[in-house]
Image (tube, grey):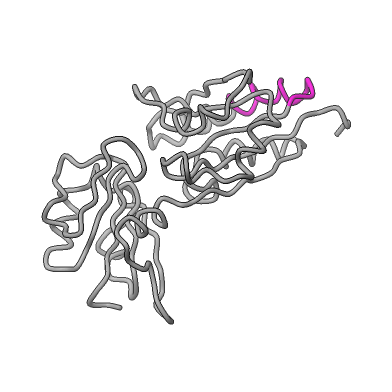
């Protein structure tokens, strides 16, 4: 790689509250001439709202990232984003790809990151506050204590019965679309939830009875109790 090529950063913006954006993330944003944003077609672009106070004259590049489980479509979108962003890197411009929470936890950014890494570009991960850590703080409870295990389960993908049978403290990520199924499986167990943590419309549920089936996709559940 020639010295004049830019560096690619996967930047964790935290769960929603701009106050949880790290100093490292802000410094990195300012060092990038190009800011890449995943575009799923939603009316609200959450990550841009989190960082807007720190943007100056950077170019914003929207990368099409459809909300689908079709592996071929996902592969195409990730490769397309990597190819587009490589042009800016070749021009010597640093590129920051924004992602909610932390890039290492179920993020779109890391798919693009890995492709660019394979293509020979310099890459770096800027960690962010994970949504489940922020949710536990909102609920004012620990995630895990002593020798207790912590399990993170993607609620819309996993075998929930198997996941909920794990011993220890269990986090269910992005569980809003599976609310009815989740509530049925959790019947009688101690669970708490936070919707849209740190964003407008935030709701904190200290009991699952108030978490309804029309809950936000951005819902994080913390399950404690019988297996701990």
Q: Residue at x 48, y 28 (%)?
A: 48
* Quarter containing the C terminus: bottom left
Q: Residue at x 71, y 20 (%)?
A: 87
Question: Residue 215, image x and y in percent?
Answer: 20, 42
Total marks placed: 0
Above or below — where is 199 with respect to 106? above
Q: Nearer the viewer, residue 61 or 178?
A: 61
Q: Single out the residue that lies furthest toward the bottom.
A: 147
Question: Residue 201, image x and y in percent?
Answer: 26, 37
Question: Residue 190, image x and y in percent?
Answer: 19, 68
Residue 22 placement, left or right of 122: left
Q: Which residues are magenta?
A: 80-93
Above or below — where is 208 with respect to 106? below
Question: Residue 178, image x and y in percent?
Answer: 23, 47
Q: Main secondary structure of the magenta part?
A: helix
Above or below — where is 159 with respect to 177? below
Membership of 81 in magenta stretch: yes
Residue 148 placement, left or right of 97: left
Residue 154 placement, left or right of 20: left
Q: Nearer the viewer, residue 35 or 111?
A: 35
* Quarter containing the N terminus: top right
Q: Nearer the viewer, residue 89 or 67?
A: 89
Q: Residue at x 36, y 68 (%)?
A: 142
Q: Give the quarter of the image for residue 224.
A: bottom left
Residue 40 placement, left or right of 26: left
Membership of 154 in magenta stretch: no
Q: Residue at x 72, y 29 (%)?
A: 94
Q: Give the quarter of the image for residue 138.
A: bottom left
Q: Nearer the viewer, residue 199 or 37?
A: 199
């Amino acid at each position: 790689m020639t010295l004049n090529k830019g560096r690619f950063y996967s930047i964790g913006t935290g769960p929603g509250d701009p106050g949880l954006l790290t100093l490292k993330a802000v410094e990195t944003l300012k060092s990038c001439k190009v800011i890449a944003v995943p575009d799923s077609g939603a009316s609200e672009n959450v990550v841009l709202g989190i960082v807007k106070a720190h943007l100056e004259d950077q170019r914003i590049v929207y990368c099409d990232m459809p909300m689908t489980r079709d592996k071929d479509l996902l592969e195409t979108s990730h490769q397309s984003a990597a190819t587009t962003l490589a042009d800016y890197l070749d021009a010597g411009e640093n590129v920051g790809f924004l992602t909610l929470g932390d890039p290492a936890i179920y993020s779109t950014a890391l798919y693009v990151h890995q492709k660019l890494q394979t293509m020979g570009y310099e890459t770096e991960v800027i960690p962010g506050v994970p949504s489940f850590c922020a949710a536990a703080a909102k609920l004012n409870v620990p995630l895990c204590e002593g020798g207790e295990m912590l399990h993170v389960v993607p609620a819309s993908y996993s075998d929930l019965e198997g996941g909920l049978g794990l011993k220890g403290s269990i986090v269910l990520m992005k569980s809003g679309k599976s609310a009815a199924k989740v509530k049925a499986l959790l019947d009688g167990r101690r669970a708490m939830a936070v919707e849209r943590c740190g964003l407008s419309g935030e709701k904190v549920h200290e009991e699952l009875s108030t978490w309804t089936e029309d809950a936000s996709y951005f819902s994080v559940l913390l399950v404690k109790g019988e297996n701990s």
